[in-house]
């Protein structure tokens, strides 16, 4: 869609909250139809001056009809329940059984390098430098990923044709987390502060809500898919975590928080999905065995504030946790016992909540060091380099976004390691989805999607980047379709 028509849709979306306040379904239908009409008109070839004139007149008419736009509301109690970041899609592997110490002979354990992060970065560089100029780094899926990503520029590759679908089953309650299933193109889940989780299927058309998972008595703050996508784990402000079967939406187990506190974030241990790490409002991180429902001995540690964000590195040896006081802690994770050992602490900015952490082993052919992407309430998206095997962080660069109070999250794009350049995507309080090229020295902004009528809280790509989902503080989930080249 042409840029002016995206701006028109953005204006309509912002005024959409004033339309038929008693009938939110109508508002969703209206914005869907407007998106369709604007896409069609974008192909008509109208002059740029005419398009700008239409945008100006449209804004004036809406202002006369509904009055001036008010600023987005404060996060209120929701800001106090800020939750954790997206976790990058992991390599597919088999789930583990209960006891991680007995799995070596069973053949389920994935081989993990014992080298330091400096060695890993050096190996990445060596592999890259041995390749002819312009070629991709050889991996088992490089050619397939290059075929999906194509040889287009980042700006061309992240051009979107508009809205594919809008889900509104959680309207008027914030949706803090939206996630595609691992290695999946068409299965999507989202959680809401209304206390439920929706499992959605995008194909065949029309997209549908397969199951609504109910059982939490307060808002759902976070959830995660297992590697095989057969179960989900969720955390809630009701001080419990629940295990769900994705096939039929059945609750398998309810596990109370060991401290009886609000649970704010969760993540699976990437090598052993029988272990889940949760963070709570009493400043504690706990490693939980979801088979027994008990806390792992030695698997707890205290931060300086409410735990809002968690992320493992791909091998599962390092865990990062962020809190609402502005600190990020790294922990060494014992693969045999589940024990946590506190390693390093970084104060990103005193008093600014860390709302999202996302780890990546290497970002692109140009940025081959392990990296961490962090959102914090500083109106910036921060990219850090991991400089050693204890998780020490070094700031690489930052990108301007609007975030001062809401729990905004960001992700690394799943295929960027196999093409020139590297892209990250983030929500923002300006009601837009932003794309940045982390390797572009100037003008890092690649694209901006407009259409939400409230702060955008989370974003998620499907496995081949053909679809992007974004959720906002008003409960709307938009699925965007990438333009086909």
Image (cartoon, rainbow, N blue to C red):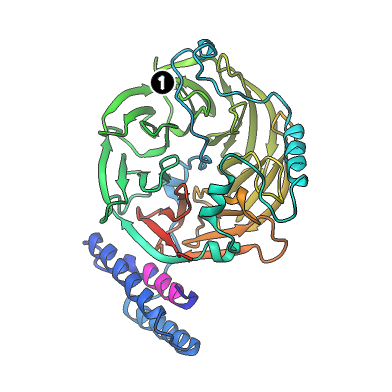
Q: Is residue 407 visible?
A: yes
Residue 58 percent coordinates (x, y): 38, 82
Instruction: Say how many tags the image has.
Output: 1
24 and 319: which is toward the camera = 319
Q: Quadrant of residue 20?
A: bottom left
User: Where 254 sits versus 86, above or below?
Assistant: above
Q: Quadrant of residue 348?
A: top right
Residue at 52 percent of width and 65 percent of height: 448
User: Where 50 sits versus 483, above or below?
Assistant: below
Q: Residues within 10 Å of mark 1 (few under 14, many from 20)?
A: many
User: Where 268 sits versus 87, above or below?
Assistant: above
Quadrant of the image containing the N terminus: bottom left
Residue at 39 percent of width and 17 percent of height: 291
As for residue 8 lying within the magenta part, the answer is yes
Drawn side of residue 101 relative to residue 329, left or right: left
Q: Which residue is mark 1?
A: 290
Residue 30 percent coordinates (x, y): 28, 69
Q: Secondary structure at mark 1?
A: loop
As for residue 274 lying within the magenta part, the answer is no
341 and 50: which is toward the camera = 50
Drawn side of residue 84 relative to residue 154, left or right: left
Residue at 38 percent of width and 28 percent of height: 241
Residue 226 percent coordinates (x, y): 42, 31
Residue 296 percent coordinates (x, y): 50, 15
Region of the chain picked out in magenta, as a range: 5-13
């Amino acid at each position: 869609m042409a840029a002016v028509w995206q701006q028109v849709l953005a204006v309509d979306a912002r005024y959409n909250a004033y339309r038929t306040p008693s009938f939110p379904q109508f508002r969703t239908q209206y914005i869907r139809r407007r998106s369709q009409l604007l896409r069609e008109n974008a192909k008509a070839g109208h002059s740029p001056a005419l398009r700008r004139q239409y945008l100006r007149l449209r804004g004036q008419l809406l202002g006369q009809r509904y009055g001036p736009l008010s600023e987005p509301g404060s996060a209120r109690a929701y800001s106090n329940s800020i939750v954790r970041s997206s976790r990058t899609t992991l390599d597919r592997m088999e789930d583990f059984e209960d006891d991680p110490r007995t799995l070596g002979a069973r053949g389920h354990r994935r081989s993990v390098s014992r080298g330091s992060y400096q060695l890993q970065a050096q190996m990445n560089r060596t592999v890259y430098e041995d390749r002819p100029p312009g070629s991709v780094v050889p991996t088992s899926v490089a050619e397939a990923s290059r075929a999906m990503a194509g040889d287009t520029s980042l700006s061309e590759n992240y051009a979107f044709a508009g809205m594919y679908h809008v889900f509104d089953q959680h309207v008027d309650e914030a949706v803090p987390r939206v996630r595609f299933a691992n290695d999946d193109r068409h299965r999507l889940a989202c959680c809401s502060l209304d206390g439920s989780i929706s499992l959605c299927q995008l194909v065949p058309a029309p997209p549908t809500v397969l199951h609504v998972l109910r059982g939490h008595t307060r808002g759902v703050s976070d959830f995660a898919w297992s590697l095989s996508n057969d179960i989900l784990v969720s955390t809630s402000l009701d001080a419990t975590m629940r295990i769900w079967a994705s096939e039929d939406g059945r609750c398998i187990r309810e596990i109370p928080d060991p401290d009886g506190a609000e649970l704010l974030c969760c993540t699976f241990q990437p090598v052993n999905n029988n272990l889940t790490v949760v963070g709570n409002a009493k400043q504690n991180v706990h490693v939980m065995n979801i088979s027994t429902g008990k806390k792992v001995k030695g698997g707890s540690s205290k931060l300086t504030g409410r735990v809002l964000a968690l992320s493992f590195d791909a091998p599962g040896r390092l865990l990062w946790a962020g809190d609402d006081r502005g600190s990020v802690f790294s922990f060494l994770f014992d693969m045999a016992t589940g024990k946590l050992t506190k390693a390093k602490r970084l104060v990103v900015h005193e008093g600014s909540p860390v709302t999202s952490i996302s780890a990546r082993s290497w970002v692109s052919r140009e940025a081959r060091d392990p990296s961490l992407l962090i959102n914090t309430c500083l109106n910036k998206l921060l990219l850090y380099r991991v400089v050693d095997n204890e998780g020490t962080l070094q700031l690489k660069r930052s990108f301007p976004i609007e975030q001062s109070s809401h729990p905004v999250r960001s992700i690394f794009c799943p295929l960027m390691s196999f093409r020139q350049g590297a892209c990250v995507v983030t929500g923002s309080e300006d009601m837009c989805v932003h794309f940045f090229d982390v390797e572009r020295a100037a003008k890092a902004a690649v694209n901006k999607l407009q259409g939400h009528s409230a702060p955008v809280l989370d974003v998620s790509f499907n496995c081949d980047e053909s679809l992007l989902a974004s959720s906002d503080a008003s409960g709307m989930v938009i699925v965007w379709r990438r333009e086909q080249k």
